[in-house]
Amino acid sequence: MQARGILLNYEGTIDTNGQHWGAILWHKFRKHHIALDKSAFNKAYAHAEAALATGNIIRSDDTFLDVLVHQITQQFDFLTKAGHQLDYTLIGKIAEECDQLAQRTLRKAKTILESLSNAFPIVLVSNFYSNLNAMLTEFGIRNYFADVVEPTYETSLSDTAIYELGVQRLGYAAEECVAVGDSYNRDILPSKEIGCQTVWLNVESWEEWGIDELGITDAEIGDFNQLPRLLEKWDPAFLPATR
């Protein structure tokens, strides 16, 4: 296959190397002995996601640590209203641990991003909270992306619309673009629908609906580090090998 540009998902792809943030936070809740079953956690996580996406909570200059504190606070407030007894001093501890995890992962991803961005343009696509540019600058990786596509509080975008806009920003036909993401439902399906080539970073999903049987993606990897070699295999003249 041949490609001219990449649409790269942010959250869960390059900041956690394929681990969904819901799974990471669930592990952290268990580590800190928060007495909670997964069903209750899932409801709290979904509530927090919706609150941050639709409420005037996240500011455009918020750091990732700020986002984590807001997210976990929303979860704790939801669970407290549901009758759970929680230690609010754990919010800062869990947020710090998650922030450090993201920083470690992004440090490892920098070499890959540099190699990819030297070979062809990358547009970052995200369903984040309108502060992605600030976070990319904070982590020192904004310069690797030709553009960033994310919804705003004023303008919501469907998953398909985000990838359509990403293709427009690259300026190529959809079939000339490779979409890379960790979510089969929110990254692979919508990007494939509009005609992109797709690479699924399949590590620890938050989706449980028989996705392994769909077989829609063009390629599957288990580590972000595998992406340059995969693209080189598709088109040896396109990307120099990352040693």
Image (tube, rainbow, N blue to C red):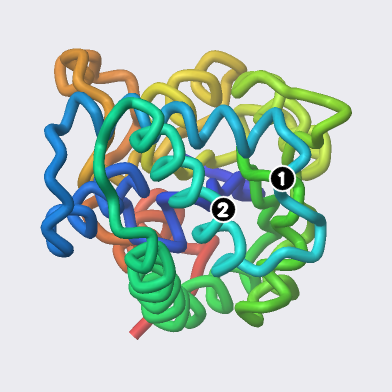
- Residue 21 in percent (x, y) is at 36, 49
SS at badge 2: helix
**Rendered view: 26 above or below 14:** above
Report which quarter residue 204 is drawn in. top left
**Three-letter amino acid code at the position of disc 2:** His
Marker disc for residue 228: none
Question: Can residue 132 be seen here?
Answer: yes
Marker disc for residue 57: 1
Pointers 2 and 1 in contact (CB under 8 A)? yes
**Rendered view: 104 above or below 134:** below
Q: Nearer the viewer, residue 168 or 147?
A: 147
Q: Badge 2: few (under 14), some or many (20 or more) residues near its Cα, within 10 Å?
A: some
**Three-letter amino acid code at the position of disc 1:** Ile
Name the residue at 41% across, 50% down.
Answer: 12
Q: Badge 1: few (under 14), some or many (20 or more) residues near its Cα, within 10 Å?
A: some
Marker disc for residue 70: 2
- Residue 11 in percent (x, y) is at 49, 50
SS at badge 1: loop
Of pointers 2 and 1, the one earlier in the residue sequence: 1
Name the residue at 49% across, 36% down.
Answer: 48
